[in-house]
Image: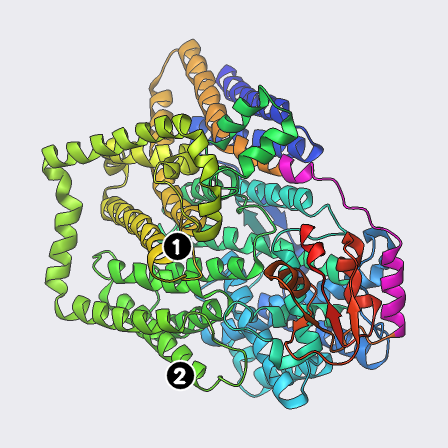
Amino acid sequence: MFEGKGALLAQLLAFIVTTSVLAYAARTAFGLVFSFILGVLAMVITRFTIQGKTPLVCMKIPLLRKVDAYSLLTILYAVLLILLLSAHTLGVMPKHLVFFREWYAIPVQNYIFLLASIGTIFFLPGYFIFRLIDKDCSIRGLDTLVFSFLLSCFYTPFIGLISMLLLGEVSTVFFLSISLLFLTIYIFVSKIYLKNTGIEKVNLTIHARPMLLIVIAAFFAASLAFSKDYGYIICDLWIHQGYSLSILKLGLDAVRIPLGWIHIGFAYLFIVSSFPVINSMLVINLLQIMPILAFYCMVRQIFQEQSDMIADIATMFFSLFSGFGWIFALKLMQNDSWPNALTHTASTVANDTLFSNLWSLPGLSPELGIGFTAFFALVYLLFFTSKRKKTIIALTFLIFITGWFAHTSEVLIFVILLGILLLNRFIGRSRKLSISSALIAGLFTVLIVSQFSQTVGLFKVGFLQSALLLVYLSVATLWSVIFQKKSQLFMRKTVNVEHNRIIYTAVVMLILFLWMLSFYLWVVEETTLWNLCSIISDVGFVPWYVYPIRLGIVGFFAVLAILFNRIIHEQFKEMKELIYTLLILCGILFFLGKAITIANIYIQNTNYYEIAILRYFLPAFVSLIAAIFLWCVLRSVHTRILRISSIKRKLLREVAVSALIASILIMGTTSTLFSIDYWADQSRSTISGDLNIAEVMLEKNSPFWNATFVGFSYESMYILKRLGVKQVYDPMARVIVLSPTGETYYFALWFTDANVLLYTPEIDDF
């Protein structure tokens, strides 16, 4: 009895310490909520360490006992399509788009239409394409959601392009009708429906991992903190709103691929749901949860469910943990106010390098989120074991195309890393050939299509990079096939370098020395870091010693994984090669980032920056290494606790464990907490009476006319592009000069039906 109370006491202690310390550092209600969520997380990890298991969250659905998931989703998709199609054809939807509404002022039926639109645009179409490819339902559950999302991100813009080619506009009725037609053909002609009925049954009990649910809850809390400023959307969401509006106004001329394909999907969400534009963008912001879910599925697939806890810990590291920027912020708070200290920290070293995560905070470019979801899905397929090669090839091809169209860089970097992974032995030869063949076909496809799209504003980014990587991947594949034994010998020698203890010890000591040196340089050269901001903004340059600072305690655990590798080998002997491969990939990513910076400075701007490697790619692989190490440590601690016979000693050990876990969470997530507080503290921009003027103009005029402008500077063009206004160099008759006020430049597009908006340079001050 007392032993159970001791475990409960340790969990409560972990909750109290974590919550109280983080809550003391928090300054907003959102920070307090985040602190509470982290306290619950500390309890779950403490329970796992002491008892060796975590509870599952179960939900029973007795009403669906005789209904399979395939039939249920088929009925749901058909009902949603008919509902939306009827609403648009019968005149239920408003004739003109609304720019913004307070959430409480939006009718309930509009929320229903919004949810229906999200399902029919971003999830359900891809599900049926996915089931057409994966006929055996070998991929299930949360993994299905990720692949359905990616395939929907390919399907919806593709139908939009057809609509613009045939009708000259993004047509709602066309999209819904074609989707309903495809669903009907899919069910009654292909007979896939009959084949799949009964295969994918809805379980009477749905199990959910508590740590994943905690991460999701923390994400939504951060989303609310970021997007509370309803009137003015900050960061990249502005730009994507403008791109989507320009597609509705200008049609095919406004489509940009890569870096613009998904805007067709956003445009469809505006007109299919008839939800206010700004409110819709804030809802779209929630789709940034998909990279986190994709990462979780990827890690679980890599370990083949040997330990779901590793996937939980890795996802926690990847989404919740950030760097040691909180130390810098606390130092500044001694002599400055709290808001100024956070602002200073957030703008030091590549803007938000010292802050971030969850996942790099909502408000990230939506297309970048899709790109990384595709990246993790491709890694997932690399480790996916299936007897159906056609399934792997088809999914890899479509996911690569989707990622390339949405945000080219992520899938191209996957191709670079794949060339290294082809040397690995734990990935089967057949699987490597399937993935490589699909990617070669994908690269060849995008190069061919780009040659037939010169009249449209398509394929301006990534052509040269794709061509070079096509050659690179072809050579790497041939090498891995023809010289397979030499490739395996190379990897074997690389992995077994630890047998030479002198070399191994020297490498480990060098890494530890550089890790400690980075802190010294960071402290001593704060002024230098501040002065480097201009260089960082231009080319994304990051000093090498910032990498350990940004990776934080997760990076420290990765270093410990190298130092104490025997702990891992004792519990995960079969993962020895995987860990060293991950370390090699981390090194390649570091040098790739430096190569990108050198190219940007001395050769030509690549439209990509080293800072992206540090923010997004490295944390993913480092989190995986650190998760393996921490899992092994926690398992070892659990084993030692079980061996203790004395109740008092066991209680002291359990209390020490709870304190250790609380310390790890506090040191790892304080920067994330400060990031949430930083955005939550931003005051809401005032919505003046000009909003009413904009709404009146929307009612009296077509909301999207061919308004154009002449920009005098880059800043002026940049701001008006956010509003979806197209730039021209041959202005026509009527010209309107905008006055330099915040409300005017924000709503200027809606104030006038002028052909040309002449933008004054003074407005750049804003």
Tell whether position 714 is magenta. Answer: no
Is 611 situated above or below 641?
below
Disc 1 residue type? Gln
Q: Looking at this rendering, what residue extends furthest in the bottom direction?
A: 166
Look at the image and give the residue range highlighted in magenta: 677-700
Identify the residue shown where x is 56% and y is 88%.
189
Residue 706 picture location, percent across and down: 73, 78
Does residue 527 appear to the left or right of 586 in the view shown?
right
Residue depicted at 61% across the width and 23% down the height: 336
Image: 279 above or below 148 = above
Q: Residue at x 43, y 42 (%)?
A: 314
Residue with the mark numbered 1? 301
Q: Distance between the residues labelled 1 and 2?
A: 33 Å
Is 693 colored magenta in this rendering? yes
Say few, some or many: other residues with alpha carbon within 10 Å of mark 1 (under 14 / 14 to 19 / 20 or more). Answer: many
What residue is pinned by disc 2? Answer: 448
Q: Which colour scheme is used?
A: rainbow
Task: Inspect this view and state whether residue 324 appears.
Answer: yes
Picture coordinates of residue 763 (x, y %)? 71, 55
Residue placed most toward the observer, 747 or 372: 747
User: Secondary structure under badge 2?
Assistant: helix
- Magenta residues: mostly which secondary structure? helix
The quadrant in which residue 221 appears is: top right
**For marks 1 and 2 on the same chain, the one whose residue lies earlier in the sequence:** 1
Task: Residue 154: give x, y in percent of width and height.
Answer: 53, 73
* Tag of residue 397: none
Amino acid under disc 2: Ile
Query: Badge 2: few (under 14), some or many (20 or more) residues near its Cα, within 10 Å?
Result: few
For image coordinates 85% across by 63% down, the residue present is 694
